[in-house]
Amino acid sequence: MNLSDSWNYEQFDAEAQRLYEAGDFDQALGLLKEALTRYPDSVELLVSLGYTRLAREEYAWARAAFDGVLRIDPEHEEALAGLGDVLLKLGERAEAFQIFEGLIALGYDQDVELMLCVGRSLLREGLLSRAERFFRLALAADRESPDAALDLAFTFYRDGDTEGALFWSREAVRLDPRFGEARALYGNVLYERGDFRGSLVQLGAIPVTDLADPIVAWRVVDLKRRLENLPSDAEELQPYLLALEELAPEPSPEERLLAEVEARANGLTAGPGTGQLDLFGRPPDASAVDVHRVRAPNGVVYEGDWDGIVRAMRNGSEEPGVSLSDFMRNEAMRLHALTGIAVSWQTARAFLEDSACVGALEIER
């Protein structure tokens, strides 16, 4: 007999949530469908179904699941938050805002996790001032919440407010010194402000096993080499280099060739091939800089080092206030959606070379 044959709805829901948190949305969905054939009126299962559909970007199905919950319990807070998120994805912002405000009217502004959930939904859609409001409500409900402090830091960072990002990321680290995500943002902001030693203190305090962002691994290696005069093969750097290989593996020759073939098949002009992360570039204060020349499709020409070119592109874009990493990531996602070819965004050089590969610009030197 299959073990699940004897499960009640709570056991089904717990296993589905485990699969969801592991990123196995297909298995979670299959399990929830099976569970709902046995417990069709289970609010818990319907809520989990809604969030699983949402994670799979099946917005109409997610909406139907949350609507099913609200027919049973019109004030179910998780279903309301989920439905609001779905409506944002569908472009029905006024209706989503009304639902979120309704949660506050129902007294859920004291629910820290729910306020964070709503704030993150708004942040993902770039609705920064509204996201800030809900993160501040979460912080008001729990002054010791490092998650609320970090979410505020991310909001300010996305808005180009490095002072606010610095304050709240530092506060998140104070509230939880073992909070790796908070140290990563704190260290990255310090790096972008030119405080390289302060950045190394923060980024270097994150256990290598907890690293989740290749940019952090790259910056630790770079800063240790520059500030501590370590050779590139120093034993101290090896754990970070191994982490970097796992987090941002170099494409195989076959993958490179396939990308170029796909680019040509789509009528795109292939530019220079994508190189490795430029781990061992010039130090932050180096006076000699390689100058490159990049021409955009509208004829605008950018000259400078890789970072300077991307910064100029960002400054001339519709979102000049976002960070360089957010600008590159957003552009990379846009180009991938247009061409079907992945574009790197971890470094300025990789971003520009991959953009040239898909025909979005031309590198003249």
Image (cartoon, rainbow, N blue to C red):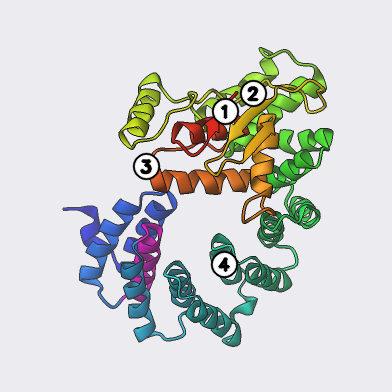
Tag nearer the camera, 3 or 1: 3
Extent of the magenta region: 42-57
Circle nearer the N terminus (4, 2)? 4
Q: Is residue 316 magenta?
A: no
Asked whether disc 1 touches disc 2, contact meaning CB atoms under 8 Å apart, the reply is yes
| Mark 4: amino acid | Leu
Q: Is residue 315 above or below residue 114?
A: above
How many numbered discs sit on the rendered protein? 4
Q: Which residue is mark 4?
A: 122
| Residue 218 in picture, x, y percent from top left | 64, 29
> In the current view of this chain or complex, which residue is farthest to the left?
1
Q: Kindly identify which residue carries mark 3.
A: 340
> Which residue is under mark 2?
279
In the image, residue 110 above or below residue 15: below
Which residue position holds label 1?
244
Q: Earlier in the sequence, mark 3 or mark 1?
A: 1
Q: Are marks 1 and 4 in contact (CB under 8 Å)?
A: no
